[in-house]
Image: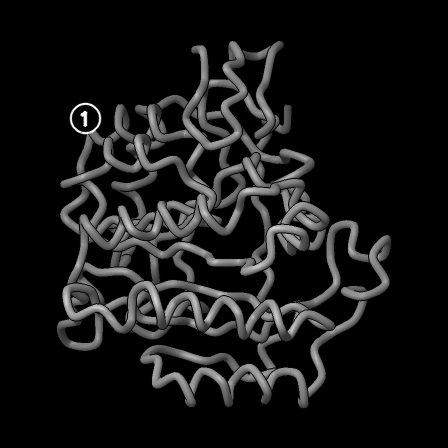
Amino acid sequence: MICDLCPRGCHTQRDETSRGYCGVGELPKIARAALHFDEEPPISGSRGAGTIFFSGCNLRCVFCQNYAISAENGGRIVTPYQLSEEYRRLEALGAQNIEFVTPSHYVHAILKSLDYYHPRLPLIWNSSGYDKVETLRRLEGVIDIYLPDFKYSDNELAKRLSNCDDYVETATAAIDEMLRQQPENVIEDGVMRRGVIIRHLVLPSHIKNSIGVLEIVKRNWSARKETSALVSLMAQYMPAGRAADYPDINRRLTKRESQKVLDRLYDLGLDGFAQELSSADKKYVPEWDYGSDNR
C-alpha cells in the first residue's frame, strides 16, 4: 500500500521491506490484546476494556512508556481476519468495549477486520491526537468513543520531544472532527457508550505546556454548547524510552507541579478525571505478549 494515512504524509509503499515513519508494514502488528482495568472509570467499567495495543507509531515520543512497541516495534503480525478473532475473544471474556490503542497507521486493516466481525460493543479510538482529518472521516459511523491525547500546546516542545512541529494545529483539527462525529457523551450504568475524552499527560518541567493545553480545551471545546468533551488529566509520567537523554524530563512529577495543573483544571471548570501521583508506578505499565512472531 502507498500510505498517506497520517499527517506525516510519507507516501511510502508499506510492506515487509519498506516502511513509513511509523516503522511497520501493511499488516497489523499487535503487542497485547487483553482486558485492561487501568483506564478512566467509564472506559474500564467493572469488567475491563478489551484493549488491543498496536505496534509502531506515527509520533514516537522520546518519553513513551510503551517505547518497546511504539519505537522498537515489538509485536506479532496478524491478518485482518485474525484481528477480528481477537474481538470475538475479548467480547467472550466480558469486555466492556473494544479499544484500539495507537491505531492510526492501521485504519485500513481495522476497517477490513470489522467486515469479518463487528463486535456488539462500543469501539474506542485511543490515539496520540496526531491524526489526519480525512482518515478520521473514514471512521464515521464506526467509532463510538474517541480517546485522543492532546500532548502539547507548544509546537517547539512537540518538535523536540516528538519530532513534530505542527502538533497543536493538527491535533486541534483532529479533535474537532472527533467531536463532530461524537458531540455528546453518553454514559449508562457507569459505562461510556459514545463520546470524546481528551487526555493530557503532564510532563515534568513543562507545566506551562499543560496549562496551555487546558486553556485550548476550554476555549475550543468546553465552552461551546454543541460539544461536551471530557478531560482526563494524567499524572502517571515516569521516565521511559529515551528520557535519560533529556534532563528536563528525566524525573517524575513533583507534587507541586501536579497541583498547579490540577488547580488550573478546576479554575477553568473543566469536567472529567484526574489521576493521582501514585499512578506513576511501573505496575500500571502493560506486559507485552508478543507471541512467537517478533519480526
Front-lying residue, 96 or 244: 244
Name the residue furthest front.
219
Q: Is residue 255 above or below residue 210?
A: below
Q: Position of residue 280 (x, y in %)?
A: 64, 74
Q: Residue at 43% across / 49% down in the picture?
A: 171
Does residue 164 appear left or right of residue 27 in this picture? right
Does residue 293 appear left or right of residue 144 in this picture? right
Q: The residue under label 1 is which amino acid type?
A: Asp
Q: Is residue 13 above or below residue 68?
A: above
- From the image, which quarter does the N terminus lie in? top left
Does residue 217 appear left or right of residue 206 in this picture? left
Judging by the rendered image, the residue that carries numbered circle 1 is 115
- From the image, which quarter does the C terminus lie in? top right
Colour scheme in use:
one colour
Front-lying residue, 100 or 35: 100
* SS at circle 1: helix
Q: Position of residue 77 (x, y in %)?
A: 50, 25
Crowding at mark 1 (Cα within 10 Å: few <14, some 14-19, many 20+): few
Q: Residue at 29% across / 71% down in the picture?
A: 222
Q: Position of residue 154 (x, y in %)?
A: 60, 58
Rendered image quadrant of residue 52: top left
Rendered image quadrant of residue 238: bottom right
One can see residue 139 in this view: yes
Rendered image quadrant of residue 97: bottom left
